[in-house]
Image (cartoon, rainbow, N blue to C red):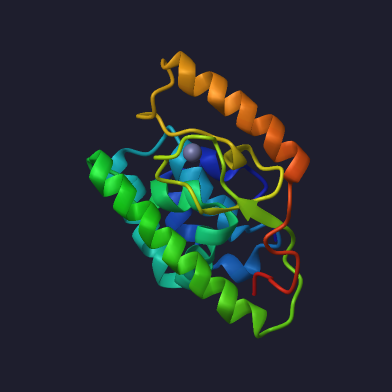
Amino acid sequence: MKIDKPFNTLTKNEYLLYIPEHKKYSDFNTLGLYRSLLENEKLSIEQKIEVRDIAHQNFFKTFEFLQLKDPRTYLEVSTLGQEMTVADERQAWEDIRTNQEKIIKEKKLNHRNFGQYSKHNCGYEDCPMNGIMIKEGSWMAEWHMRFDSDSNEYAKQEKSERRKKDRKNKHQIINENLELD
Ligand SMILES: [Zn+2]
């Protein structure tokens, strides 16, 4: 059986229908489900939280893995409806950094192949995402947080210099043995 429409167009009742029966649908994608909560315009924030919590009852382990696979989505889904201060956001990234290391350690034991990661490097020394593992080539590798000083010309120039240097020295942090269950 197939759901046969994008998750981000589902109503709350449809989510609640599909999630517990997910094994019956060949096109059910757990990561897609979580990502859709950020895009779905049919749901109020309260409904999104409700759907997320039901999803967690079914897929919490997979959700935890999003910290490595797509940390921005993980953060946004985790904090749906919450007012985040800069300090909160910094702490959240710190936690993700710690959890990424845990996940990597655990998964390495399983000797599976997950793909290539490198560390986030936007060029700003005080970026809360520094040291976060990002899938190579993803938009998040050099993506930049909203409260960073984008208007600062010096920082911009420094960033572009760093980018040039990074391209030269690009190295892989992880290249082995990680996979989603
Ligand atoms: Zn950054």
Q: Nearer the viewer, residue 77 or 25?
A: 77
Figure label count: 0
Q: Is 14 left, or right, of 140 in this rendering?
A: left
Q: Is residue 32 above or below residue 121?
A: below
Question: Residue 136's x, y, as percent?
Answer: 70, 49
Relative image position of residue 26 (x, y in whole percent): 71, 62
Quarter of the rendering containing residue 147: top left
Locate residue 70, reporting x and y percent: 56, 52
- Left or right position of 140 against 117: left
Front residue of 49 and 84:
84
Which residue is pictured at 53% across the width and 35% down the height?
123
- The residue shown at (57%, 66%) is 22
**Residue located 45% across and 45% down the image:** 37
Is residue 43 shown above or below 21? above
Q: Can you see residue 84?
A: no
**Placement of the N terminus among the 4 image quadrants:** bottom right
Where residue 115 appears, as percent x and y from the top left, is: 74, 61
The quarter of the image holding the C terminus is bottom right
Instruction: Identify the image quadrant of residue 103.
Output: bottom right
In the image, 150: left or right of 119? left
Give the answer, above or below, for where 2 lies relative to 174: above
Q: Residue furthest bottom?
A: 109
Residue 89 shows in the view: yes
Q: Considering only vertical position in the picture, is 6 above or below 53?
A: above
Horizontal side, residue 14 vs residue 147: left or right: right
